[in-house]
Amino acid sequence: MKTIDRRRFIQWAGAFLGSAALSSTGFLRPQALWGANRETGFEPDVEIYLEAGYDQISLLSGPRTDVWRYHGKVLTGPEETLDLSDMSYLGPTFRFRRGQNIRIRFQNLLPDETTIHWHGLHVPDTMDGHPRLAVAPGGSYTFEFKVLNRAGTYWYHPHPHGRTGHQVYGGLAGLLIVSEPQEAALPLPSGRYDLPLIIQDRAFDRENQLLYMPRGMMDRMNGMMGDRMLVNGRPDHFLDMDSATYRLRILNASNARIYRLAWDDGGPLTIIGTDGGLLERPATRQEVLLSPGERIELWADFSRHRGGDVVRLVSRPLPQAAAGGMMMGRGMMGGRMGMMAGRSPLDDTTFTVTTFKVGTAAGPRKDLPGRLRPIERYAREDADNTYSPKRFSLTMSHMQGLINGRVFDMQAVAPDEYVRLDGTEIWEFANDGLGMGMMNMPMAHPMHMHAVQFQVLERWGVSHDGYLDAGWKDTLLILPGERAQVIARFSPYAGLYIYHCHNLEHEDGGMMRNFRIS
């Protein structure tokens, strides 16, 4: 099935835009758009207009590709708030400063309802993109929030129930970078030596159109995985690098694919940050597992290479436990089931994520700091439920994702999903390895919690050197047969939030639940 029905979109958009007032820039005039949700008394430091709509992009040789994408412009505030560098179909990069008041006037020009989730940010529940607040086609919504998070790499994407995977795959996603003086004072690469890398996989038909879930049931079970790598919205991505030190901000914005990132020359990865910003001190790994929704920041010193060298960031084949329903194991019927699943050429081999070509021009070479940013550590004893952690079992049955045997309900909150405002709790996610289908294929589940950043206390069941559980996290990979405990403080906002698997097809299939802070 193609991602976008071009004819349906153009007919709908034409009818809507024909009656709308357009400015000379082609954007809709802001003053007539906004819904009645805007908070009274809110004084923004930055005001942005953002729309989701249809576009065509030259991605491959031949016909242009139909996509859905975000367009935006700054209405008031610093122009550099919105980085409009060419990211192909991806949305503009937001650059916020901690403490700023942000107002985003959003207009939905899609034929689907949609909403926006500010992934990783602490925002009021009515600003978090909960699917109960989805914006109808032609509708608008005003997001207002203060940037409370520490400096770090965050992102934004749609969150309508049952359509998130479809919309993200179609192109709706963008990066969000928060800065603050404490981080700016550190001797880290900056400016053009601070590079975002948004990694995604996609499948295309012969007319260069995106294919979404062409294998039907198997794609719904496994999650949608393509056979082409795109970085920053471009296939065959490469960058010309100075002989200098770089900061690489890497976001896995794929629907379902888990990456096992490594340097092709076997050198160690130097990690300086995760989902919620910088670590206390750098960490090294030979490889890192990065599941959908997760971010890492790498320190990359290209001055150790000679001019003309080519350096590749690659993804190695996943271990069997991480592969789960992707059928990486070749046990009984593995080959046949793999063909039934329509396996991607990316699955069984080491493949290139992006290529760096080192030049002869010298840039700033920096020394890696031994210490980065302090992190307030939570201990088990800090939790309200130290001796009785909440346990959430992750299973799949009859084409649905389940959490404690429950599927998503727009308003329902179970007794164990209530949390005290300003309380601190331990949550345990348990992937019992119960999958679905004729072979009961086990699935990996990257679990994401809205409203909080958490710390990982402990894992059981699977050992893998590619985990990096240090620092602040909002998304955590739980492999089949594995349990993990996290601790979080539920502050500063009360309200209705969600937690879910960030395999977007699992999320759309029901592996998502509400929790209420009160």
Image (cartoon, rainbow, N blue to C red):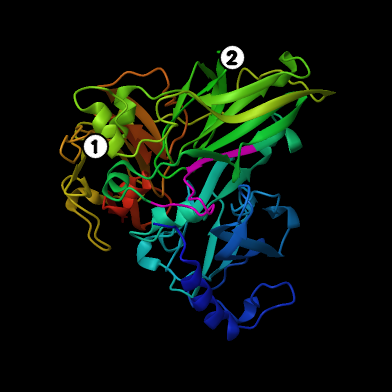
> Magenta stretch containing residue 355, yes or no?
no
The percent position of residue 290, horizontal first and vertical second, equals 45, 31
Q: What are the residue bounds of the magenta stretch? A: 196-212
Q: Is residue 481 visible?
A: no
In the picture, measured across the screen, residue 308 lies left or right of residue 342, that is right
Q: Helix, strand or loop at disc 2? A: loop
Classed neighbour count for the residue bearing mark 1: other residues with Cα under 10 Å, few (<14), some (14–19), many (≥20): some
* Label total for image: 2
Percent x, y of residue 314: 53, 25
Residue at the bottom extreme, as displayed? 19
Element type where label 1 sits in the image: loop
Q: Position of residue 186 (x, y in %)?
A: 69, 29
Q: Is residue 374 visible?
A: yes
Give the quarter of the image for residue 18: bottom right
State left or right for residue 424 relative to residue 114: left
* Label disc, if present, on residue 385 of the rendered structure: 1
Disc 1 + disc 2, Cβ < 8 Å: no
In the picture, which quadrant includes the C terminus?
bottom left
- The image quadrant of residue 247 is top right
Per the image, the residue denoted by label 2 is 265
Q: CA distance from mark 1 to mark 2?
A: 46 Å
Work out whether residue 346 or residue 468 is closer to the camera in this orientation and state it. 346
Classed neighbour count for the residue bearing mark 2: other residues with Cα under 10 Å, few (<14), some (14–19), many (≥20): few
> Quick one: which residue is furthest to the right in this view?
361
